[in-house]
């Protein structure tokens, strides 16, 4: 489409007028249906400001101020910053703020049209676009014309004031970000404490260990008062709780309930692994991959009718009794960590906060 318009304008010796230019810009740049539309618009308007311009020179300044300088700087691409640069130089040259010299420009008036927008591009656009904007600002801010040397101190002062304003804004943002971090720290400690004092086994892992973490393989050797059980291999993860690990072991045995079996864990050298809290993860007790764990099974309370057998054993007997349900889903659902993780709006809010703090 841009090629057709260019041919019509050139062969018909016509200018693209303000209304038509604005309609095209609004349609393709501001309200683009696809990023490719905006990209094509940037390229085409950049070509309009070439050696043989197709845009009415009398509307360059108006179009630049009313359209290009009102576009969200974050939408600029490489073609977009090139388009901005051509209009920026053309408009300021016509206003005699910039003067062409050899292959570059010299500045005669530091009050360049579009300089504030250029600062916005530097501060909010992507890294590559911001770098090109910095190069453009450097080019037009350091090439002084014969009438601008007297204003170097004024320009330096203006630059310092602009930098000072940005620094003050950054300082305020850092203060607010610090407040947010402190509030989040309070919330983190509150959630961790609620998780710590919860007495039941968790159906949903607490947020501090809400992933399986590192998968590990453990070799289990049973020690019983009765018949020796076969060694088994267990695949688990370092965030599994000790109570869950013990229950899963007993599920592989027949006639075993966690209420009437005491389970002690020993290292391969015979040293007892002292479990201070069954709700702690395996990683708390330095249980690593490929570790050999000696498991001692001792009856508690009413003795078992028979020694527990391996689930792979073919001997007949009473069917395995289910392990008692130690989970309390109703109580667990009231924990703040569970509430936060179960609501998408809370998750999105904290992700945005995280990005905001990182950005600042």
Image (tube, rainbow, N blue to C red):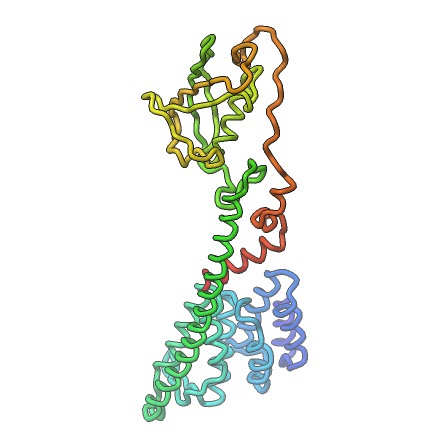
In this picture, residue 264 sits left or right of residue 27: left
Image x and y of residue 305, in percent: 56, 10
Q: Quadrant of the N terminus?
A: bottom right
Give the farthest residue toward the front. 301
Image x and y of residue 353, in percent: 52, 60
Seen in the picture, residue 120 relative to 108 is either above or below; the reply is above
Who is closer to the viewer here, 67 or 318?
Answer: 318
State the count of labels. Answer: 0
Identify the image quadrant of residue 69: bottom right
Seen in the picture, residue 39 relative to 283 is either above or below; the reply is below
Q: Residue at x 44, y 70 (%)?
A: 175
Q: Residue at x 62, y 19 (%)?
A: 321
Who is closer to the viewer here, 181 or 54?
Answer: 181
Identify the image quadrant of residue 153: bottom left
Q: Residue at x 50, y 84 (%)?
A: 91
Q: Residue at x 63, y 60 (%)?
A: 34
Seen in the picture, residue 219 relative to 191 is either above or below; the reply is above
In this picture, residue 91 sits left or right of residue 101: right
Q: Quadrant of the C terminus?
A: bottom left
Image x and y of residue 197, in percent: 51, 44
Who is closer to the viewer here, 154 or 24?
Answer: 154
Image x and y of residue 120, in percent: 48, 74
Who is closer to the viewer here, 218 or 40?
Answer: 218
Seen in the picture, residue 219 relative to 29 is either above or below; the reply is above
């Amino acid at each position: 489409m841009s090629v057709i318009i260019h041919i019509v304008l050139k062969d018909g010796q016509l200018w693209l007028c303000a209304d038509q230019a604005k309609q095209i810009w609004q349609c393709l740049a501001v309200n683009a249906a696809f990023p490719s539309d905006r990209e094509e618009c940037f390229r085409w308007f950049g070509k309009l400001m070439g050696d043989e311009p197709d845009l009415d020179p009398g509307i360059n300044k108006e179009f630049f101020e009313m359209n290009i300088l009102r576009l969200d700087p974050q939408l600029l691409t490489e073609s977009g910053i090139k388009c901005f640069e051509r209009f920026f130089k053309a408009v300021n040259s016509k206003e005699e703020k910039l003067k062409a010299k050899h292959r570059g420009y010299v500045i005669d008036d530091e009050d360049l049209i579009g300089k504030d927008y250029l600062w916005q591009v530097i501060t909010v656009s992507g890294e590559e676009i911001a770098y090109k904007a910095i190069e453009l600002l450097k080019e037009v801010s350091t090439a002084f014309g014969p009438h601008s040397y007297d204003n170097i101190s004024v320009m330096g002062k203006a630059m310092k004031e602009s930098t000072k304003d940005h620094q003050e804004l950054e300082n305020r943002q850092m203060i607010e970000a610090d407040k947010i971090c402190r509030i989040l720290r309070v919330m983190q400690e509150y959630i961790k404490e609620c998780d710590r004092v919860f007495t039941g086994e968790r159906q949903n892992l607490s947020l501090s260990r809400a992933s399986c973490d590192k998968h590990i393989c453990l070799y289990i050797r049973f020690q019983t008062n009765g018949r020796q059980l076969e060694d088994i291999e267990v695949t688990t993860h370092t965030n599994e709780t000790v109570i869950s690990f013990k229950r899963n072991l007993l599920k592989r045995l027949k006639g075993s309930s966690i209420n009437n079996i005491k389970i002690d864990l020993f290292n391969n050298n015979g040293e007892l692994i002292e479990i201070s809290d069954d709700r702690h993860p395996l990683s708390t007790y330095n249980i690593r991959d490929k570790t050999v764990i000696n498991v001692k099974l001792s009856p508690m309370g009413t003795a078992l009718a028979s020694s527990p057998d391996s689930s792979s054993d073919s001997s007949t007997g009473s069917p395995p009794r289910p392990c008692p349900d130690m989970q309390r889903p109703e109580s667990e659902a009231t924990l703040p960590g569970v509430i936060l993780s179960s609501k998408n709006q809370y998750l999105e809010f904290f992700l945005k906060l995280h990005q905001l703090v990182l950005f600042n």
